[in-house]
Amino acid sequence: MGSALRTNQPHEALPPEIYLPLVDSLFKEGRTLFAGTILGAGSIFITYWKTGEALLLYCAIAVLLVAALRGLGQRFRGSNHIRRPRQACRTKCG
């Protein structure tokens, strides 16, 4: 019995005209990162508080640290990094 995730078809990459704007959109909005981090880490902290499992505390701290690093990356990347797909493809695709 095969897994539902396995396919015999080769992996196809997205065209740069789709891939590059998609990646750039991940760095546009800082509020969604902040809200997701607070809600995600908050739920982990509540679960830690109810269960007392120390590993959950470490996971919540790790989530906060990764989100802080990503937030710094967003800040340094800035909105001036977003380019038109054709221009970005010329520089990134060779």
Image: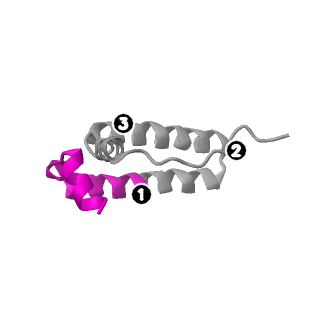
Q: In the image, what residue occupies the spot 23% across and 57% down?
A: 90
Mark 1 or mark 3: whose residue is earlier in sequence: 3
Residue 43 picture location, percent across and down: 52, 37
| Residue 52 horizontal side relative to residue 74, left or right | right
| Residue 39 horizontal side relative to residue 8, left or right | left
Q: Which mark is residue 65?
A: 1
Q: In the image, what residue occupies the spot 69% across and 45% down?
A: 8
Mark 1 or mark 2: whose residue is earlier in sequence: 2
Q: Which amino acid, by three-letter code, is at mark 2? A: Arg
Residue 18 picture location, percent across and down: 34, 40
Q: In the image, what residue occupies the spot 55% across and 38% down?
A: 46
Q: Which amino acid, by three-letter code, is at mark 3? A: Ala
Q: Residue furthest left?
A: 80
Q: CA distance from mark 3 to mark 2?
A: 34 Å
Q: Which amino acid, by three-letter code, is at mark 1? A: Leu
Magenta-colored span: 66-94
Dot 2: few (<14), some (14–19), or many (≥20) neighbours within 10 Å? few
Query: Which residue bears the numbered disc 2?
Result: 6
Taking depth in this image into account, of 56 and 66 the one nearest to the observer is 66
Q: Which mark is residue 35?
A: 3
Query: The N terminus appears in which quarter of the rendering?
Result: top right
